[in-house]
């Protein structure tokens, strides 16, 4: 074999090109990543400094407000200001009285103004006694309001707290306390934080800084960034100044009645020096690696020639074996061309093998998909269990608060909105529980046709007029063992997805319902037993779904929608729900041809539908109840609801202590309510121990997880009632009243 004919040369050339390109890209990526990491670290420090300064200034302002309110009703001070002179013979003059208060207040600015806005006393040298006080907010203070205001002074800004001196609705004057936001304040902040600090007003002018006035230009402050930070009050503006080597943060800070811009600067010259050193090190390392790669590439080219020749010889043998002929002359001298002929023959053999094993491969994919859903479902069920405890607390307390407020009260309306959000969250948890196969919702024999029509009616009002809905109902029997929420969830999810597919250009949404008989040898519908089924078909005329997406359409957390528009749980939850009630769901589509989702649900014998639960409010009652749950907030919520109805509750978060309490006086309690999953003693263990002491004791067992315990198991253990979290206060109270009435 001649050297130029081998594939080793272009292969190694490509290898060297990729290696060198990767080396250069890695060099620049590592350098910029290091720079970003170091600068971001400085920005985080700056953000922490901003938080410290904000807390400090807010505390100062709160102190000013508290001090002014303390002086507002000071009888002696009011009397001295109202007198208007210091000639009276009382032992305390106004000057002496202020001298007594001033050291205790620890404030930089202290002024007293009479009812005519004339200064009676001031710590400010440029505000002598008898001059007119022009501080902003003085007019509102003379009208009886406590005012916080920013004022411009000789050396910067000041925050003033003004409050009227009044007695029996009569105003005698105004007391003003204040702190200065000046160069000294900025310098103190800079010394405490080891940063440069400056404050700018809404005009973009620097009002105070930690640098002397003749050095402020070195700060490099840009007015457009000040205005931008003031416009975007919730988002600080960051900047790097290569001229002075500082990183800056411009952040809006609300003080009193104005918004200022706090400017914090950190020295990053050390970072630039470190990056320069790292750049030199990376360059040397890159040259070393490049030399090693070139040497390895040369060795690899030499090493690969012999294996490639052996590979070509093996290809000749395969061609002869599969075709019974020697390779033609056009395939000699080049490894890849020889392999093409060999692979063509091998491909034909493999295709025959694949055709024989297509069915087994399909079953294997279904098994892997089922395992994936089971694994994610277990995780989702655990999360939903914990969330149920939180929802139960919110639901009970919000419902209790609604009952205690007037319907005309805005708080009542706000609580109603919150309650709607709680029910939405509960429905979401139910979806997750259904998907994870942990949901234990009671199934009923239902007429499915009214539920389908109700869902379509709801859709008509919410879909745009460009989408037409066509109903094709061709069934006489429509009894299915499920729950109303199952049908509603299936319809709303599938029809909403179909509408989304036609949102841009409009189209037709077809809802078809008919009866179908599945034979034992019918392979068109996977994993269904022979029998009568109700076939629900949702068809749209949208853009369709490509084959790759169609294979993952029922995977949890898979979505083709943009971030924020979809969770990827809708179809996965529907898939688990349909299989739970003994049915199947199948998706068919091609790009540009629309989509069809077909749901098969087993028909059952016609019986009367199950009655709906009563919506009457709970009745008050009497009795001593033992309530046990390891979640303190749930205990408090149950106690609040049941005590309000007249019951006496004894609550415990430790199941062992609850059992000890019951052992002391078993006849003391009329009913017990316990959680299932608790440390030390579980709800079942605690129930058995209580029943061993008192067999007639009624017990209610609550759980947020329905896989390892269901109603049948709980009742067989002696429990009187088994409920799922989250349960509302009214529903729990009804169960308690029912059990105590029967007992």
Image: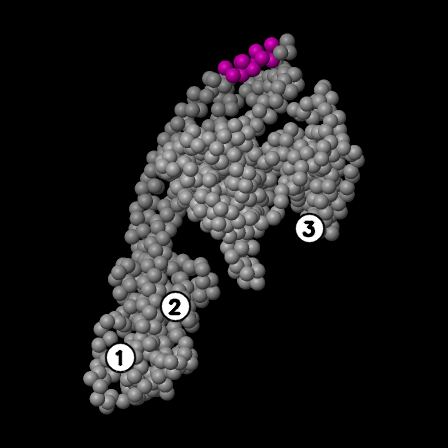
* Above/below status of 417 relative to 567: below
State which region is magenta: 310-321
Q: Earlier in the sequence, mark 1 or mark 2?
A: 1
* Above/below status of 122 relative to 229: below
- The residues bearing labels 2 and 3 have C-alpha atoms spaced at a distance of 47 Å
Residue tagged 3: 462
Q: Main secondary structure of the magenta part?
A: helix
Front in this rendered view, residue 707 or 544 = 707
Q: Is any atom of residue 391 visible in this view?
A: no
Dividing the picture into quarters, in which one does residue 137 lie? Answer: bottom left
Residue tagged 1: 123
Q: Earlier in the sequence, mark 2 or mark 3?
A: 2
| Place of residue 151 in the rendered image (x, y in percent of width and height, measured from the top left) | 37, 76
Taking 336 as reference, is 682 left or right? left
Residue in the picture at 40% in, 58% down: 238
- The residues bearing labels 3 and 1 have C-alpha atoms spaced at a distance of 68 Å
Dividing the picture into quarters, in which one does residue 121 lie? Answer: bottom left
Residue tagged 2: 255
Asked whether disc 1 touches disc 2, contact meaning CB atoms under 8 Å apart, the reply is no
Of badges 2 and 3, nearer the viewer stands: 3
Residue in the picture at 34% in, 76% down: 72
Taking 39 as reference, is 596 left or right? right
Q: Earlier in the sequence, mark 3 or mark 1?
A: 1
Q: Is any atom of residue 465 visible in this view?
A: yes
């Amino acid at each position: 074999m001649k050297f130029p004919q081998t594939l080793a040369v272009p292969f190694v050339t490509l290898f060297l090109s990729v290696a060198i390109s990767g080396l250069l890209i890695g060099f620049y990526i590592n350098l910029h990543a290091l720079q970003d990491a170091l600068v971001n670290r400085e920005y985080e420090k700056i953000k922490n400094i901003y938080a410290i300064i904000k807390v400090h200034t807010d505390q100062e302002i709160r102190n000013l407000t508290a001090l002014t309110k303390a002086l507002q009703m000071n009888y002696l001070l009011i009397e001295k200001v109202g007198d208007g002179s210091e000639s009276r013979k009382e032992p305390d003059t106004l000057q002496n009285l202020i001298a007594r208060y001033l050291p205790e207040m620890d404030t930089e600015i202290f002024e007293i103004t009479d009812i005519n806005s004339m200064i009676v006393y001031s710590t400010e040298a440029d505000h002598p006694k008898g001059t007119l006080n022009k501080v902003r907010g003085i007019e509102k203070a003379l009208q009886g309001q406590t005012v916080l205001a920013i004022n411009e002074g000789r050396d910067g800004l000041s925050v003033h707290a003004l409050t009227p001196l009044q007695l029996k609705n009569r105003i005698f004057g105004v007391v003003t306390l204040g702190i200065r936001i000046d160069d000294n304040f900025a310098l103190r902040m800079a010394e405490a934080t080891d940063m440069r600090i400056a404050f700018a007003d809404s005009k973009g002018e620097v009002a105070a800084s930690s640098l002397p006035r003749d050095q402020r230009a070195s700060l490099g402050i840009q007015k457009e960034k000040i205005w931008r930070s003031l416009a975007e009050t919730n988002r600080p503006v960051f900047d790097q100044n290569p001229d002075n080597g500082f990183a800056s943060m411009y952040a809006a800070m609300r003080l009193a009645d104005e918004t200022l811009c706090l400017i914090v600067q950190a020295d990053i010259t050390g970072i630039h020096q470190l990056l320069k050193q790292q750049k030199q090190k990376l360059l040397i390392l890159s040259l070393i690696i490049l030399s090693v790669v070139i040497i390895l590439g040369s060795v690899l080219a030499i090493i690969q020639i012999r294996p490639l020749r052996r590979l070509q010889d093996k290809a000749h043998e395969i061609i002869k074996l599969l075709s019974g002929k020697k390779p033609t002359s056009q395939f000699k001298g080049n490894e890849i061309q020889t392999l093409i002929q060999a692979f063509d023959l091998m491909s034909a053999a493999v295709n025959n093998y694949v055709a024989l094993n297509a069915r087994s491969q399909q079953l294997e994919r279904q098994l892997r998909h089922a395992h994936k859903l089971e694994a994610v479902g277990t995780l989702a069920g655990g999360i939903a269990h914990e969330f149920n405890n939180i929802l139960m607390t919110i639901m009970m307390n919000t419902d209790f608060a609604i009952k205690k407020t007037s319907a005309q009260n805005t708080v009542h309306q706000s609580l109603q909105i919150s309650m709607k959000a709680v029910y939405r969250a509960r429905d979401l948890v139910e979806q997750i529980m259904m998907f994870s196969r942990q949901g234990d919702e009671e199934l009923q024999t239902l007429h499915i046709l009214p539920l389908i029509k109700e869902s379509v009616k709801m859709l008509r009002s919410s879909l745009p007029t460009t989408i037409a809905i066509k109903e094709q109902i061709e069934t006489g029997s429509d009894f299915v063992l499920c729950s109303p929420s199952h049908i509603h969830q299936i319809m709303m999810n599938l029809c909403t997805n179909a509408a989304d597919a036609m949102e841009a250009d409009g189209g037709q949404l077809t809802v078809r319902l008919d009866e179908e008989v599945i034979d034992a040898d019918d392979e068109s519908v996977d994993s269904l037993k022979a029998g009568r089924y109700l076939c629900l078909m949702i068809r749209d005329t949208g853009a369709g779904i490509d084959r790759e997406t169609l294979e993952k359409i029922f995977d949890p957390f898979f979505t083709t929608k943009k971030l924020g528009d979809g969770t990827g749980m809708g179809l996965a939850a529907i898939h688990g729900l349909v299989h739970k009630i003994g049915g199947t769901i199948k998706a068919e589509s091609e790009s540009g041809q629309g989509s069809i989702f077909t749901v098969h649900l087993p028909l059952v014998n016609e019986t009367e539908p199950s009655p709906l639960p009563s919506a009457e409010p709970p009745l008050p009652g009497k009795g001593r109840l033992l309530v046990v749950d390891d979640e303190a907030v749930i205990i408090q919520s149950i106690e609040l609801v049941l005590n309000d109805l007249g019951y006496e509750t004894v609550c415990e978060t430790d199941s062992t202590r609850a059992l000890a309490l019951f052992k002391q006086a078993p006849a003391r309690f009329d009913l017990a309510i316990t959680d299932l999953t608790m440390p030390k003693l579980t709800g079942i263990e605690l129930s058995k121990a209580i029943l061993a002491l008192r067999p007639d004791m009624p017990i209610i067992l609550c759980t947020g997880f329905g896989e390892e315990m269901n109603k049948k198991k709980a009742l067989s253990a002696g429990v009187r009632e088994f409920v799922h979290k989250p349960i509302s206060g009214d529903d729990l109270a009804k169960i308690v009243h029912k059990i105590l009435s029967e007992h």
